[in-house]
Image (cartoon, rainbow, N blue to C red):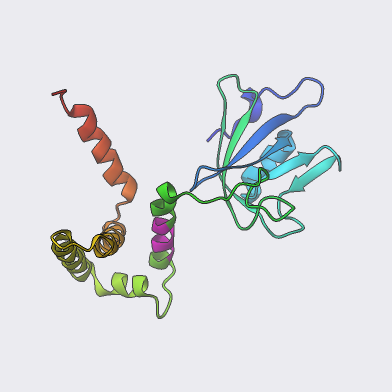
Amino acid sequence: MKTNISHIKFDAITGLIPAIVQDHLTGKVLMLGYMNGEAIKHTLDSKKVTFYSRSKERLWTKGETSGNFLEFVSMATDCDEDTLLIKANPTGPTCHEGYDTCFQEENKSSAHFISELEQIIIERKNNPVQGSYTTSLFNSGIQKIAQKVGEEAVETILEAQSNDDQALVYEASDMIYHLLVLLQAKGLSWNDVTAQLVKKHLKKKPD
């Protein structure tokens, strides 16, 4: 994330730079806005994505009226340093017309759902909720959580030998969920697992 805006190339006439906003979890492009130096500083300080409104001629925090804020995650420039990429977590529809994105796309991606699920698990770990199954798992300790992963793995193996594909998918999803909880309980994350998979892939010699 770049916080030193001195290297950013603002438009010489308007003093603005285009900012593409992308959902941190799904990867969907949410909207395009414009920022000046003050808007960037306000975004970094408030952790809510703020633009410069060309029509209102003032700073404008997305969601200041609707309550659908864009919670700031990171900021980067392109190779020419004249366009920003902002990653954020939306708290509601981004488009003022009620759409998930300003391009009328649905902001969902099954490929990124594990990251979203992991964030929920982290939230339950850091802020326990009475009656939450995830919270109860963390309270039970590492041994019990590891035992649940083993139980779900056995059930997955058993269903793999049956003719019920839906049951196999169901048990596999339970196994992955409990594995995510176990990783968090150990202070690890899904990214640690995927990084190891990448490492193994790169080391693998061609057949």
Question: What count of labels does the image hold?
Answer: 0
Nearer to me, 143 or 104: 104
Point out the residue furthest to the right here. 56
Nearer to me, 58 or 23: 23
Q: Would you identify the image quadrant in which residue 153 lies? A: bottom left
In reply to whether residue 47 is colored magenta, the answer given is no
Point out the residue furthest to the front here. 163
**In the rendered image, the vertical position of residue 112 relative to residue 167, given as above or below:** above
- Which residue is located at x 24 percent, y 39 percent? 197
Nearer to me, 18 or 73: 18
- Which residue is located at x 28 percent, y 59 percent? 169
- Which residue is located at x 17 percent, y 28 percent? 204
Magenta portion: prevailing SS class: helix
In reply to whether residue 119 is colored magenta, the answer given is yes
Tell me the quarter of the image containing the C terminus. Answer: top left
Question: Magenta residues, as a range?
Answer: 117-123
Q: Is residue 129 left or right of residue 188?
A: right
Q: Is residue 24 left or right of residue 41?
A: left
